Amino acid sequence: MAIKPVEEVLTTYEAQSHWRFIKTHTPLDGIPYFENVTYLFVARDPRDAFVSMGNHRKNMRPEAIAKLINSAQQRNVPVQPPPPPDVRELFREWITTSGIPEDGAPTEFNVLHHADTFWQFRDLPNIHLFHYNDMKADLDGQMRRISAALGIPVNEAIWPQLAAAGFAEMKSNAETLAPTIGAGDEWQAKSSFFNSGKTGQWRDVLGDGELALYREAMTTRLEPELARWLEQGWGNHHA
């Protein structure tokens, strides 16, 4: 997110003395690849990801959005046009864009393209794919996968405290856990940053026409195994 000068961001990271970690919403084709870096990619059912992004946007204060836009404009970063007010129209626009900037400015990055860039390299030893559904079903097991991927031994003495950090616990501690993204007091309600965490929310939002477009995109743009994984996760079959 281009909300701070890159020099300021780099200074922050250079000052860190702990294990450095960077969160990004950028697809793998848009970030540098290093063999000595571990990449953890987390996916969610695209339809629920869309609903979550809508809730996220609604929870942002208008003045915070204005500050972000102004910050981007000052650094000549392209600003996306306001999304259409109708949620179904927005979904139709969102699911049919490529998510690739050169193809035109989408209202949001396309999660299909995003997931595919990591999926194609999932056999590399330093790229690991995780899914929201698996974390909801077995947080302990998924955290152990992360621990193994990073080469950090599990400390069984404190592990129960760590593995208790589920969605409900995060929402109850929203005042301290809701992130600050650089614009000051961004949220209408910090607890709403952790909105509901449920799967299948899209059923109350999307109609038959939107779901037909979605299925077409999933079928034509993704290989069947990736499409299945995006909707369901690994289950008991970890890559």
Image (cartoon, grey):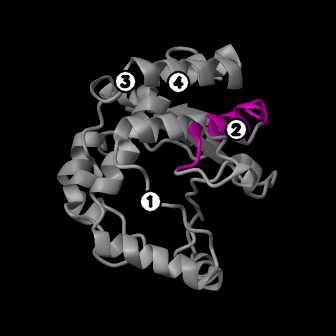
The answer to whether residue 61 of the structure is visible from this angle is: yes
Which corner quadrant holds the C terminus? top right
Q: Tell me if mark 3 has few (under 14), some (14-19) or many (20+) residues whose alpha carbon lies within 10 angstroms of its own.
A: few
Which of the 4 quarters of the picture holds residue 155?
A: top left
Disc with the residue nearer the chain's start (1 vs 4): 1
Q: Which of 22 and 1 is in front in this view?
A: 1
The kind of residue on which mark 3 rests is Ala
Mark 3, residue position: 137
Mark 2, residue position: 118
Q: Nearer the viewer, mark 2 or mark 1?
A: 1
Mark 3 and mark 4: Cα distance apart in space: 25 Å
User: What residue is rendered at 23% in x and 60% in y?
Assistant: 190
Disc with the residue nearer the chain's start (3 vs 1): 1
Q: Nearer the viewer, residue 133 or 13?
A: 133
Where does the magenta region start and end?
A: 108-124
70 over 161 or under it: above or below: below
Q: Tell me if mark 2 has few (under 14), some (14-19) or many (20+) residues whose alpha carbon lies within 10 angstroms of its own.
A: many
The kind of residue on which mark 2 rests is Phe
User: What residue is rendered at 40% in x and 79% in y?
Assistant: 67
The kind of residue on which mark 1 rests is Pro
Mark 2 and mark 4: Cα distance apart in space: 20 Å
Mark 1 and mark 4: Cα distance apart in space: 22 Å
The kind of residue on which mark 4 rests is Tyr
Q: Is mark 2 on a helix, strand or loop?
A: helix
Mark 1, residue position: 82
For this view, does 22 lie left or right of residue 163?
A: right
For this view, does 193 lie left or right of residue 97?
A: left
Mark 4, residue position: 214
